[in-house]
Amino acid sequence: MSRLSNLTRGILKENPVLVLVLGTCPTLAVSTQAVNAIGMGIAATFVLTCSNIVISALRNIIPDKVRIPCYIVLIAGFVTVVQMVLEAYAYSLFEALGIYLPLIVVNCIILGRAEMFANKNTVFDSALDGIGMGLGFTLTLLVMASIREILGSGTWFGMGIPWLKDNGISVLTMAPGGFIIFGCLIALVNKITKKEPTPDDENYCAGCPSSDTCKNFGKGGEKNVRADG
Amino acid sequence: MSEQMVKLVAILMGAVLVNNYVLRQFLGICPFLGVSKDLKNATGMSIAVIFVMCLATAVTWPIQTYLLVPSNLAYLQTVVFILVIAALVQLVEIALKKYIPALYRALGVYLPLITTNCAVLGVTIANIDKGYGFAESLVNAFGSGLGFFLAMVIFSGVRGRVEHAQPPKPFQGLPITLISAAILSLAFFGFNGIVENLFKI
């Protein structure tokens, strides 16, 4: 049962984008077209699953103090693999994702899951977690991209939709549309899961690997920040 | 003004106003949402970002041009760049702590966050992708950092107001912040075409 929940909780309950609020940059940037969203989702899922497996297999070997640089190197390795594969076999997608493809390295979903899950759990569980979280990421991207593509340019996966095609709300395909749709989707998920808004709304970056540093800003404590070495 | 100067100024203005990293290209959204709650932190974070962006570009551009490309290792770009940035941030932190403690006290807390800031890796890769020379890359990095600074400072003011607003319950917190960001991003659309028209290029 818990195995199954490892796989499924990424889809809604702990959706990496809408609930944990990780990986916002690629979500906003590539969700203008459903095709790109699927491509980005699959690429990130592959990197996430592989890095989760390797990190959890090496969790007793990597020294705690240098774990973040180690994770980054591992992740960057897998991202390079994805880049080379896409460049060879799916060049149009490679072009469309552009700079956001190498930026999967600093996608906080991947580093965040390494920190929060893979370095504490077995290889099999971590693999399931990676697939589940990746699926959640892909589905969110797909939903968001579908809304933006259908309403914004009147097409879906490139197929024209009658009437909407001539009456697209073009601002939705541009930068502001990304922010608006993302905000509305998060509000929708809050409504569905009945999540109470937290009084200090500080915790929306709790899933981010750097959140400890962020939290200490208010306290102005230099020593708090560096306490973990 | 010589042609080169005009080109550099055009790149700078483009990076600050038209292709603003946060509001147009969605890079560095996490710090933009996480650290923009008050002006002091927003300023500190942005200055640290400008600093690291320029430094990272000054280091990664020669590495790419004189080391990776001649030895046919350009595919290692992603791995090398992120490692260089991570090492650089650590070095800067140590150096500031030892030699300029006053600056360290002001910027030190922001530095660990910058390694995973996608705007920094983004600007170094974008400089290579666009085929900029060394001077152009540095100007672009500085301009992108300045654009980040501008967005952060404006948005910290906006958020001060949003905090006191009473939106519908599901919209409280992050969603309403994102919608304010959308409006700010819409405002930046006003700068479209300013570079082409100002410099006639």
Image (spheres, coloured by chain):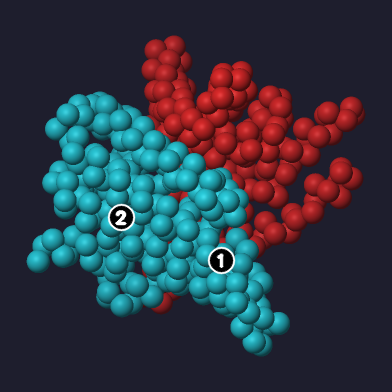
Q: Colour of chain B?
A: red
Q: Position of residue B137 (x, y in %)?
A: 67, 30
- Which residue type carries mark 2? Asn
B12 shown above or below A198: above
- Disc assigned to residue A33: 1
Residue plotted at (30% across, 30% down): A70
Q: Quadrant of residue B143?
A: top right
Q: Quadrant of residue A161?
A: bottom right
Residue plotted at (60% across, 61% down): A175
B61 shown above or below A40: above
Of the two numbered discs 1 and 2 on the same chain, state the one appearing first in sequence.
Answer: 1
Q: Mark 1 belongs to which subunit? A: A
The residue most toward the top is: B99
A160 shown above or below A23: below
Q: Quadrant of residue A73?
A: top left
- Disc assigned to residue A203: 2
Q: Position of residue A224 (x, y in %)?
A: 26, 32
Chain assigned cyan = A
Q: Nearer the viewer, mark 1 or mark 2?
A: 1
